[in-house]
Amino acid sequence: MGSPALVIPGDLVAALRAARDVAVLTGAGVSAESGVPTFRDAQQGLWAQFDPRELATPAAFARNPKRVWDWYAMRREMVARVAPNPAHFALAELERRVPAFLLATQNVDGLHQRAGSVRVVELHGNITRVRCADEGTVVAQWCEPADALPPRCPACGAFLRPDVVWFEEMLPADALAAAEDAARRCEVLIVAGTSAEVYPAAALPAQAQRAGALVVEVNPNETPLSADADHVLRGPAGVVLPALVAAAFPR
Ligand code: NAD
């Protein structure tokens, strides 16, 4: 038997078409079809030798900055080799069709922007940027000097680090505030490709729903959000999001 046919409910299509303000929250699943492993996938195969909790923390960087830098260099190279998929392009198209729009992403891969999304807030940073580990100033796009890794901040001499949010770190306040504002304001919130377990991003759907928004989950698998979402569209984001956007905004 094949997989069940995707059905987009008519009331959801009508609500999306009528909405003046739409917000989207994305996670690793949206980049899965581009070939970027989700965190669950990362526990298997080539990535299994790396435990993010041993690498993506301030303590790990203090213990062994070169090891952490090298792990991010590997991930950055992988992201540079892949391309946005139909899910990214569908969200860029949705943005062009709705007057007020915000896409809040937990992904650090920059694929939404490469697909043409403009109103994007990066809740967990971006792997292609580098900042000073002491002062936090973003100093550059990723750089790979031959002599010493990690390289040093040109202003103060501290190590540079990837401009991403590690475990035990706070989210950038302005990005989180923008996402919370969009969640409270929007009429429809689409939550795609996230396990909806990592806070504070995981709180955004409930905030939106309390403020009266319709919450739509796009995910092939059940998550803690599934029971509360107003609509659950089961399937890969690269199939479901283009179908949803095309149904609401036929060309
Ligand atoms: P996740 O890996 O926890 O969840 C991915 C979700 O995507 C799953 O629910 C899965 O069912 C779904 N999915 C898989 N393929 C899909 C597809 N084709 N289409 C749609 N959905 C699909 O990722 P997350 O929710 O983004 O994690 C949240 C945050 O947790 C991350 O942004 C990250 O900051 C943090 N985190 C980081 C690490 C790390 O390595 N630093 C590890 C774990 C979590």
Image: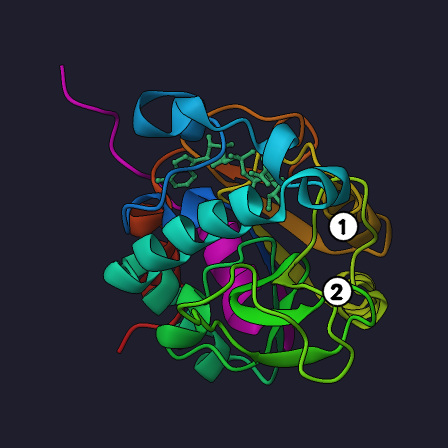
Image coords of residue 145 (percent x, y): 44, 72
Q: Which residue is mark 2?
A: 179
Pick whichever, 168 or 116, lies toward us.
168
Residue at 65 percent of width and 48 percent of height:
215
Residue 135 in the image, given as x and y percentages of width and height: 83, 72
Q: Which residues are magenta?
A: 1-23
- Please state if 92 lies on the left or on the right of 99 as rendered: left
Outermost residue, left side: 1
**Which kind of residue does numbered mark 1 sit on?**
Leu
Q: Position of residue 136 (x, y in %)?
A: 78, 70
Question: Where is residue 167 drawn, in percent x and y?
Answer: 73, 40
Does the magenta-highlighted stretch encompass residue 18?
yes
Crowdedness near tag 1: few (<14), some (14–19) or many (≥20) residues, C-alpha within 10 Å: many
What quarter of the picture does the N terminus occupy?
top left
Question: Does 115 sit above or below residue 2?
Answer: below
Residue 204: which numbered mark, if any?
A: 1
> In the depicted view, which residue is nearer to us: 24 or 135?
135
Label 1 lies in ligand 1 vicinity (Cβ under 8 Å)? no
Q: Are marks 1 and 2 in contact (CB under 8 Å)?
A: yes
Colouring used for the render: rainbow
Rendered view: 16 above or below 52: below
In the rendered image, the residue lying farthest to the top is 1
Residue 229, quarter of picture: top right
Q: Is residue 196 left or right of residue 74?
A: right
Q: Quadrant of the C terminus?
A: bottom left
Q: In the picture, residue 131 is in which quadrant?
A: bottom right
Asked whether the viewer can see residue 181, the reply is: yes
Closer to us: 122 or 23: 122
